[in-house]
Image (tube, helix red, strand yellow):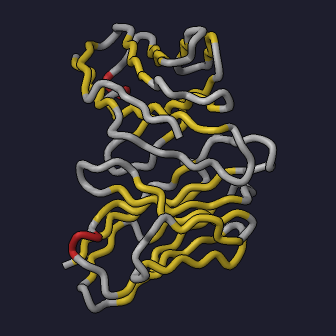
Amino acid sequence: LAKTTQPISMDSYEGQEVNITCSHNNIATNDYITWYQQFPSQGPRFIIQGYKTKVTNEVASLFIPADRKSSTLSLPRVSLSDTAVYYCLVGPFSGGYNKLIFGAGTRLAVHP
Amino acid sequence: ETGVTQTPRHLVMGMTNKKSLKCEQHLGHNAMYWYKQSAKKPLELMFVYNFKEQTENNSVPSRFSPECPNSSHLFLHLHTLQPEDSALYLCASSQETGRETYEQYFGPGTRLTVT
């Protein structure tokens, strides 16, 4: 499974757009890119998943360049409740089960 | 509320005790997972059950014993644990079709403290 690298922490302010970039240089052809969010003492929550170009849902956008060696999670107009750890995961879109390999994640702190 | 419940939410046990963690999913999924999250460490996948069959045991010590009696319930039986086993234990479920992979839904976790 492809290893991912993302910043350990980031700070932002309410109302700003936050972009968290993840590097995955050895991503395989059948790998998808998935982002999860985790609040303290809770389980992770799926945010968004994509394969290439851009994906947008009601909470975030995911930008993936053509070479797919990196991806950027974009959170528009963050609020205090977006303070959490964000995980970038890369893995095969395969059958059987989804073997998620979590890294250290990016700890996002949103300030008033 | 994710549709995955875990009980108890908090557990303190001695090293000689035997206890069980319970997970129930109300989503009709066919795959269930146990993860361990220790302080300052990434989530670690422990066990995977797909259609009630264990498909992954990620080199977990035998003092952790999983049980999946049906596709909605998952247990983690604990005995003779060590203090380093203190962690947040998370259960998750997903619907696997054999052709593609879907998101996992996590429960709130059980905070385990071994004294």
User: Where the C terminus of chain B falls, by quadrant?
Assistant: bottom left
Q: Position of residue B69 (x, y in %)?
A: 68, 79
Going 62% across and 32% down the picture, which residue do you hit? A31
Q: Position of residue B97 (x, y in %)?
A: 80, 49
**A109 or B38, which lies in front?**
B38
Q: How many marks?
A: 0
Residue B91 in the figure: left or right of residue B89: right
Residue B66 in the figure: left or right of residue B13: right
Going 29% across and 70% down the picture, which residue do you hit? B85
Going 43% across and 78% down the picture, which residue do you hit? B64
Residue B102 versus residue B87 in the image, above or below: above
Q: Position of residue B80 (x, y in %)?
A: 31, 87
Residue A87 versus residue B112 in the image, above or below: above
Would you identify the image quadrant in which residue A38 lies? top left
**A80 or A88, which lies in front?**
A88
Going 59% across and 64% down the picture, which residue do you hit? B56
Q: Residue furthest bottom?
A: B16
Would you identify the image quadrant in which residue A87 lies? top left
Residue A4 in the figure: left or right of residue A10: right
Q: Residue furthest left?
A: B115
Q: Position of residue A12 (x, y in %)?
A: 26, 15
